[in-house]
C-alpha cells in the first residue's frame, strides 16, 4: 500500500490540473482504506498480570472493554494502571496486580491483611512499615514475590539505654559486749539497705531481649551497717548435784580424802583392760591399793561416781588417775586436787 501511495504522489506531480485533482481523490481513498484496514486488524497491547506479561491484539476502545474481551474481573482491592476508562492505543501497557490475603508478623505481633502488592518490599511500603535491611530480620527477602497465604516476618533490632534501681545489701558488724552473757545477741541498729542506679545497654530483636551490658553503676544511697552486740561474759555453769551428793556421802559417814588427780584415755599410753580385768572406761579409776582398796566405790566432785578397779606405776599414796573416753575430755580435766569420797 505504501508503494501505491508513492506512485500516486509521483503521478500527481507530473500530471495536469484535472489529473491532479483526480489523483488527489485517489490518494485520499487509499488513506481511508489504509485507516479502515488498520482499525479492522486491531491494536497491539501488553497486559501484565502479577508481573507476567501477555501480548494481545485487541479491537477494544477502552481498558474496561479490554478486560471484558478477555473475561477478566477485578475485585475492589485489585490494582490496575491505567484506569478502565483509559482509551486503547497501539503499544499500550496495562498492569494488573491482584489483591492477596497474607499474614504479617511484626516483632511477634500477628495480623492479616489483604492488599495488591507484587513483592514483599511493596507490602512494607504500602503499610508504611519502617525497617533497616542491613540490621532488621525480614523473612522472606524483600525481592520475594507475594502469593496468597504468604507469611511475612519482621524482627526489628532495637538498642535501648535503660536505668534500673537496685538495692545494696548492708553489712553486719558484731561488737562484743562484756556486760551481756555469752551467746546473747542484741541488735543495736537494724541496718538500712542502700540504693544503686545501674545503667544498661539492652538489645532487643523482635521485641525479645537478646543481650544486656552494664555501662555504669552509681551509688545513690549508701547502706548503713547493722550493729549487733554479742555477749562476752562467760556463763557460770551451775554446779551439778555434786555438792549435794557429797553432803549425802558425808551424812552417811563416808570418809573423804584430799588427793591429786590426773586423767588418762585407754589406748593412749595404756591398754584397754585394767589390772583387775575390767574394761577401761569412764568411771574406772586407778588408785594405790594401800590407800584405797580395789573394788571400792567412790564419788569424786567434778567427775562423778567411780570404782577403784586399776592401778598404776606412778599412782602412789594420795594420787588417783581418772579414766576418760576421749583425749579432749582428759585435757579439759587436766591435773587438779580433788576430794574423793569413799562410799560405803
Image: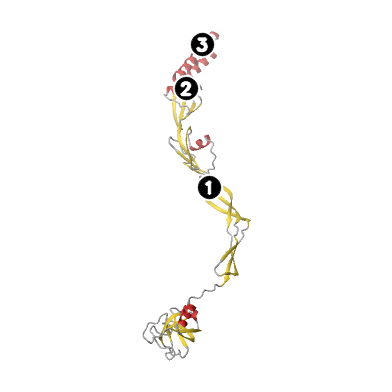
Q: Quadrant of residue 324?
A: bottom left
Please tell me whether residue 318 is drawn above or below residue 70 in the rendered image.
below
Q: Residues within 10 Å of mark 1 (few under 14, many from 20)?
A: some
Dot 2 corresponds to which residue? 64
Dot 1 corresponds to which residue? 204
Q: How are the colours assigned in the image?
A: secondary structure
Q: Residues within 10 Å of mark 2 (few under 14, many from 20)?
A: some
Dot 3 corresponds to which residue? 25
* Element under disc 1: strand
Q: Which is nearer the eye, 306 or 323? A: 306
Numbered marks: total:
3
Q: Given this view, does label 3 or label 1 mark the residue nearer the observer? A: 1
User: Which mark, residue 127?
Assistant: none
Q: Which is nearer the eye, 251 or 45? A: 251
Q: Could you say where residue 298 lies in the image, as x and y percent from the top left?
A: 43, 83
* Element under disc 3: helix
Q: Could you say where residue 158 lies in the image, as x and y percent from the top left?
A: 55, 46
Q: Could you say where residue 44 lies in the image, as x and y percent from the top left?
A: 46, 24
Residue at far left of view: 277
If you read the primary sequence from the N terminus, does the residue marked by circle 3 or circle 1 appear first? Answer: 3
Gap between marks 1 and 2 measured at Cα: 50 Å
Amino acid at each position: 500500500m505504501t508503494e501505491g501511495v508513492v506512485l500516486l504522489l509521483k503521478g500527481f506531480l507530473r500530471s495536469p490540473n484535472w489529473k491532479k485533482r483526480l489523483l488527489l481523490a485517489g490518494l485520499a481513498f487509499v488513506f481511508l482504506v489504509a485507516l479502515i484496514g488498520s482499525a479492522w486488524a486491531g491494536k497491539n497491547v501488553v497486559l501484565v498480570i502479577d508481573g507476567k506479561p501477555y501480548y494481545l491484539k485487541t479491537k477494544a476502545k477502552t481498558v474496561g472493554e479490554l478486560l471484558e474481551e478477555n473475561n477478566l474481573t477485578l475485585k475492589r482491592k485489585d490494582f490496575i494502571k491505567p484506569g478502565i476508562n483509559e482509551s486503547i492505543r497501539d503499544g499500550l501497557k496495562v498492569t494488573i496486580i491482584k489483591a492477596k490475603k497474607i499474614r504479617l508478623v511484626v516483632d511477634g505481633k500477628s495480623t492479616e491483611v489483604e492488599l495488591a502488592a507484587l513483592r514483599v518490599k511493596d507490602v512494607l511500603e504500602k503499610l508504611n512499615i519502617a525497617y533497616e535491611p542491613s540490621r532488621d530480620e525480614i523473612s522472606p527477602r524483600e525481592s520475594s514475590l507475594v502469593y496468597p497465604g504468604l507469611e511475612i516476618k519482621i524482627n526489628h533490632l532495637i538498642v535501648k539505654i535503660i536505668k534500673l534501681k537496685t538495692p545494696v545489701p548492708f553489712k553486719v558488724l558484731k561488737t562484743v559486749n562484756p556486760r551481756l552473757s555469752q551467746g546473747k545477741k542484741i541488735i543495736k541498729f537494724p541496718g538500712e539497705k542502700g540504693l544503686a542506679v545501674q545503667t544498661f545497654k539492652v538489645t532487643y530483636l523482635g521485641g525479645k531481649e537478646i543481650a544486656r551490658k552494664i555501662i555504669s553503676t552509681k551509688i545513690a544511697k549508701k547502706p548503713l551497717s547493722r550493729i549487733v552486740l554479742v555477749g562476752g561474759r562467760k556463763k557460770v555453769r551451775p554446779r551439778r548435784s555434786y555438792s549435794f551428793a557429797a553432803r549425802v556421802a558425808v551424812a552417811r559417814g563416808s570418809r573423804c580424802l584430799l588427793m591429786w588427780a590426773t586423767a588418762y584415755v585407754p589406748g593412749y599410753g595404756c591398754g584397754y583392760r585394767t589390772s583387775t580385768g575390767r574394761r577401761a572406761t569412764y568411771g574406772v579409776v586407778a588408785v594405790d591399793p594401800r590407800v584405797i582398796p580395789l573394788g571400792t566405790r567412790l564419788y569424786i566432785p567434778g567427775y562423778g561416781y567411780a570404782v577403784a578397779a586399776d592401778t598404776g606405776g606412778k599412782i602412789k599414796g594420795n594420787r588417783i588417775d581418772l579414766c576418760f573416753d576421749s583425749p579432749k575430755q582428759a585435757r579439759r580435766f587436766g591435773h587438779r586436787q580433788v576430794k574423793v569420797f569413799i562410799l560405803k
